[in-house]
Amino acid sequence: MRIVNLSSGSEGNCTFIETDKTKLLLDDGINATQTLEKLKALAIDPSRLTAIVVSHEHSDHVKGIDVLASKLNIPVFAHQQVWVGLDEKLKKVPLKNRKVFDGKFEINDLVISPVALPHDVPCFGFSFEQDDKKVAVATDLGHFNDKIISALSGSRLVYIESNYDRELLYKGTKYPLSLKRRIDGPNGHLSNVDSSDALERLALSGTRQFVLAHLSKENNSPSLAYSTVCGFLQKDGIEEGRDLKIDVATTSIGTIFRLK
């Protein structure tokens, strides 16, 4: 299995996941031209893409899907609750390529397990499994709960949201207070501190590789997210580089992870 983040953050999110028989995108919130360029930069033939899986309807996760999916004539998978908000945004995707999941489903040799996330629209995180290899992605959630932790536990690699620094959020002048409260609310996004707590719980289940994802351009930075999370873990005797590894996803092509 191979997984690489093509873009992550407020400006667009897209992750490529590959097995022997499957090549798919989780979301595509950048424009289709950018997506194709990034795939080609990784020597991935876009015409061999199997499907696109959608977490939720927000534009930073779906902006490129309509053009890309129609151009490549590939299916788009989303939960029925998510399709309610997608129908008008994916007008070029024919009915035959609009696939609905409600629980665990399979695409060729890849088993995909969705888990509902607390966000302000219907939203899902996912684990992706092939044989004994499991990776997971959970972004766009206001808080973690036991059900989400259980769904992601046992993953070799987890992409986990670390969206904002609370102090930067409330000191900033760009966002109105109502938006700040939404971001910081139980159905908004995860702060760096919240991400640290969830990451520690997942580390206890055996995960040793994490990627901090979906960082806010306005209210966070890669260095701040990394230092905050590492500092939090260090207080409990967990050291990055010794006990686990942490990367940070950005709008650039990220680290390529290969699971054998």
Image (tube, helix red, strand yellow):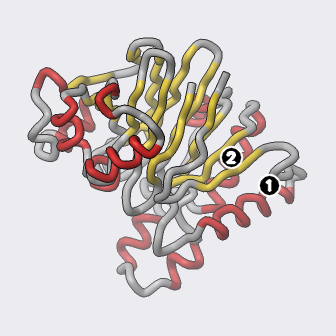
Q: Is residue 42 above or below residue 12?
A: above
Q: Quadrant of the C terminus?
A: top right
Residue 96 position, x and y percent, is 13, 21
Q: Nearer the viewer, residue 259 or 156?
A: 259
Q: Quadrant of the N terminus?
A: top right
Locate residue 207 relative to residue 124 in the image: left or right: right
Residue 82 position, x and y percent, is 26, 38
Locate residue 185 relative to residue 32 in the image: left or right: right
| Dot 1 crowding, Cα within 10 Å, few <14, some 14–19, many 20+ | some
Q: Nearer the viewer, residue 191 or 91?
A: 91
Q: Are marks 1 and 2 in contact (CB under 8 Å)?
A: yes
Q: How many marks?
A: 2
| Dot 2 crowding, Cα within 10 Å, few <14, some 14–19, many 20+ | many
For label 1, the residue is 233
Q: What amino acid type should be assigned to the residue bearing mark 1?
A: Leu
The numbered dot on residue 248 is: none
Q: CA distance from mark 1 to mark 2?
A: 9 Å
**Residue in the picture at 71% in, 59% down:** 229
Q: Is residue 119 above or below residue 131?
A: below
**Residue in the picture at 35% in, 48% down:** 37
**Residue in the picture at 47% in, 24% down:** 113
Q: What amino acid type should be assigned to the residue bearing mark 2?
A: Leu
For label 2, the residue is 199
Q: Secondary structure at mark 1?
A: helix
